Amino acid sequence: MWQSSPPGSIYDYIRVASFSIGPDGLIEQWSRRAAGLFGVAAREAVGKDPVEAFMPGELRRDGHRRIGEVLDGKEWTGLVPFRMPGEEAIHGLAEIYVMPSETATGERAAVCIVVDVRALRGIETDLAASQAIFGQSPFGFVLFGTDFTVLRANQRFATVFGGRADDHRGRTVHDYLAGPEADRLAATLSRVLATGESVTDLQLIGTAPGEPESRNWSMNLYRVHSGTGRPIGIAGLATDVTRRHIAAREAASARRNLALLNEASARIGNSLDLETTARELLDVAVPGFCDLASVDLYQALLTGEEAPPGSWSPLRQEAVGGSAELRRVAFASAVSDAMPDTAPGPVRDASQPRTPPGPPALGAVHRYPFNSPCAKALRTGHVEDVPGDDRGFVQSTFAVPMVAHDTVVGLVQFSRTKGSEPFGERDRALATELAARAAVCIDNARLYRREHERALILQRSLLPPGDPEAAGLDIACRYLPGNTATEVGGDWFDVIELPGHRTALVVGDVMGRGLRAAVAMGELRTAVRTLALLDLEPAEVLSALDEVARGLGTPGGSTSSDGIGGAQWPSRAAHKSREADLSEVYLATCIYAVYDPVTRRCTFANAGHLPPVVVEPGEPALLLDVPPGMPLGVGGEPFEEVEVELREGALLALYTDGLVESRDHPLDEGLEALRGALVAPAQPLEDVCDRVLSTLDTRHGEDDIALLMARIQGLPAEAVGDWRLPRELRSVGRARELARGQLLAWDLDDLVDTTELLVSELVTNALRYGEGEIRLRLLRDRTLVCEVWDAGLVQPRRRRARDTDEGGRGLQLVGLLSAAWGSRRTPRGKTVWFELALPDGRPAAERTVEELLSMF
C-alpha cells in the first residue's frame, strides 16, 4: 500500500520503512523502503537478528529485552540508533514503532515501522523556516493554486488588502485589481504555471481598500513544485514601490526639465526675429512640456513704436482697463491644430463690449479683460493659474508673463489636456524659466530689429534717389539689403556729375555690419562726394578718402554714441580695445571711375575692391585688370590709375562681393558666373540687371548686394565744339565768333549773348593770367558747358572788387550769369568752365537790382 501511494503523498517527504519479525525473533519480511533506508537488500536481511545486525554493541542487550517484550504482546516506541551491517559507526537515528502480531498458526510475531528521524527534523526545520519567511516577511506573500485562487497569504498581504490572512483564501486576482491589470496578472500566472519560467519585477497598479490614490507594486512570481517535481501552484512576492515610483517620476521630471532647459538654450534665440523666436519657444514646449501653448506679444513691441520706458510694463496695464493690445504670434498643439485656447474671450477694443469666448486667431490683435488671469499675470509679472475650459478638454493652464530686464514683453500660456499629468510646482518653475529665456531673446530681437530698421533707413537715405542720369551714359542700378535675420551691411554706390559732362561712378563696401557700418558708409559716401566736387583725379580721391577713413577709425576722428567730444577713456587697455574695434569697423573697399563722354575714356582707381567687368559689342565679358590696391583705412600705399577707352555700346558693371561670393561658392566661381550672365549686353539695361540677379546664385540674405551698370553712349561729334586759339589779343574776338556760330548751329539763339559775354571773360583771364596755348570747348547735352583751357597752374579766384577798381569783376559776372562755374587742374595746366541751362521756352528771369549792384 505504501509503495503504491500516489505522487504528492506525505511519504514523498518523510523516509518510512517497514519489516516484520517472526516468532523466533528473526527478520521475516523486509520491505523495499527498508532496503532503501538501511542500504541492505532483502536477501541479506531476512533471517537475521535485527538487534545484532543494526544496533551498536552497547545497546544490544536492551534491544533483545525489548524484542522479547514485544513478542510477549507489548507495543514499543522509541528512538534507536542504527548502523549499517559490518560497520561500527552509527549512521542514523530511527524512530521505531513495534506492534505485536500473530502468524496464521497463532504464534506471536511483530511488525516494525521505522521513520528516519533526520528526515522528520529536516521537514520540521523547513516548516519553521517557511513559516518564518511566510509569516514574518515585511513583503506581501501569496500562494496561488493551480486554479489561480489564493491558497495562502501572509499577514503583510492582509494588512494591505484588509481582513485576516485566512480571509483571502479562495480569492482571485480580480478581487484585488481592476480589469486590465487583473487580466494582465492572470495571464502572467498562467504563463508561469505553464512554462515554469519565473517573472521578476512585474509592475502592477491598483488601489488598496479605503485609499483614493493608486499604488504601485512590484511582483515576483515563480512556480512551486512537490517533492516529485509536480507543479502545485505559483508563489508571489509583492513589494509596494509607490514611493519609488514617485521618486522615479520626480527624478524623471527633473531630468526632463533639465533636458528641456538645455534644449531651450540650444533652440531658442537662434533667430533675431520676434515671431521666429516665439515659435522656437513653442517647438521646445510642445509636446515635451505641455499639450497646447500660445504666445502673445505687445503690439507696440512688434510695430517698433518708440514708446516711453515702461509703456508696456506691468505697472501701466491698469491704465488701459485691462491689458494693452497684444498680438497672437504663435500657437502650437500636440493634440489638434484646431484645439480651443484656454484663455477667456479677448476684448478687441476697450470701448467695445467683450466678444464671445474664444481664442484669438493667429495674428489677431486683442486685449485681455481686466479681471482675467492673463491680464493679472501681465500686471503683476507672476504666473497665474487659468481655469479649465467649459468643455472639459483642458485640465490645467499656466499664464506666464514674459519678463526681460524687469519689463513684460508678452504672455505665454502652457496647457495640459485631460489625460495628461496636471501641472505641479516644479512645472511652474520650469514654465517661468522657459518664458524668461524666451523673453530675453525676444527683447534682444526687438532691440536688434530697432537698430536694423534704423540702419536700413540710414543706408537707403544715403543711396542715390531714383534712377541716376549722366551725360553719355545709360545707367541702371540695384541695391538688395540683407534679410531681417542678418545685420545691415555697408555697401553703397553713387553716380556723381562732374564738370565737362563727365561722370564719377563709385561702388564701395564697408567691412563690418550693423548700424555702425551704415554710419561709416554714410560718412565715406559724403567724403567721396565732397572730394569728387574738387574734381581730383581718381587716385587722388582714393588717397584722400583713405585719410578720411583712417581718421574715422580712431577715437578722435569721429563722434561715437559711446562717448562725447573729448571725453577721456577709462583706461589705456580700454583705449586700445576701442581703437582696434573702430579701426576694424571703418575699413572699406572702393572703386572709383571717371568717365568722359567726349573721349569715351574711363579712368579707374581701386582700393581693394573687386575688378570691374566690361562687355563690348560682340565680345565676351572681361574683368578689367585694375590694380586692387589696399583697402581704405589701411594707409601707407599709393593708388594706381588705369585709363580704358570704351567702344560705343559697351557695358560697364561695378558691384560688391555679395553678388559673386558666398559661403558655398568661392569668389572665382562667382566671377565666372557673372561673366556668363552678361551675354546679351544689347538688351535694355534694366533687363540685364534683372537677369544677372536671377541667374547668379547670390544666396540672397547672407550679404547686401550693390550693382551699378552703365552703357557707354558718348557724346556725338556734332554736340562738341573744340578749337585752339593762339595766345594773342585777337583770340578774344575769335572766341566770341566761334561760340556764336556754334550756338546758332545748335539753335540756341537765346544763349548767344550770355555765352559770348562769359567766353570773352574767360579767354581774357586766360590771356592775362594763364600760359601757353588757349583751348575753347563747347559741349551740348542736358546743359551747355563752356571750357577754356590753358597751361597756367594758377587757379582763378573770385574776389569782390572795390568801388575804385576798373576790373576784377569778371568772375563775379560769370558766377551771376551761369548756372555753375569752376576750375580744375589738368595734366598740362587748368580748365575754367561755366554751365548754362538749355532754354525751355519760358522767358529768362530778370536780374534783380541787388544782383546787378553786387558786381560794383
Image: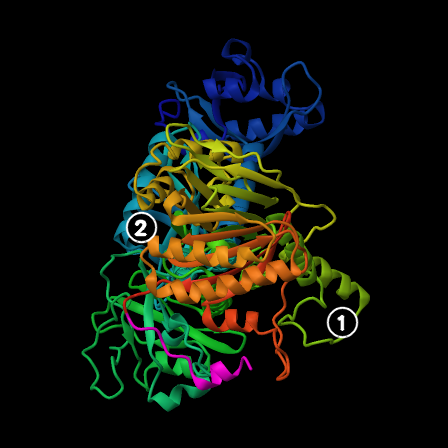
- Vertical arrangement, residue 369 with respect to residue 797, above or below: below
> In which quadrant of the rendered image does the C terminus lie?
bottom right
User: Does dot 2 land on a helix, a strand or a loop?
Assistant: helix
Q: How packed is label 2: few (under 14 Cα within 10 Å), some, or many (20 or more)?
A: some
Q: Nearer the viewer, residue 110 or 721?
A: 721
Magenta-highlighted stretch: main secondary structure? Answer: loop
- Residue type beneath disc 2: Glu
The boundaries of the magenta stretch are 842-856
> In which quadrant of the rendered image does the N terminus lie?
top left
User: Does dot 1 land on a helix, a strand or a loop?
Assistant: loop
Which residue, given by chain and number where applicable, does mark 2 sit on? 181
Q: Nearer the viewer, residue 388 or 103?
A: 388
Q: Residue at x 36, y 26 (%)?
A: 5
Q: Nearer the viewer, residue 437 or 114?
A: 437
Residue sticking out furthest to the left: 356
Query: Is 571 on the left or on the right of 401, as rendered?
Result: right
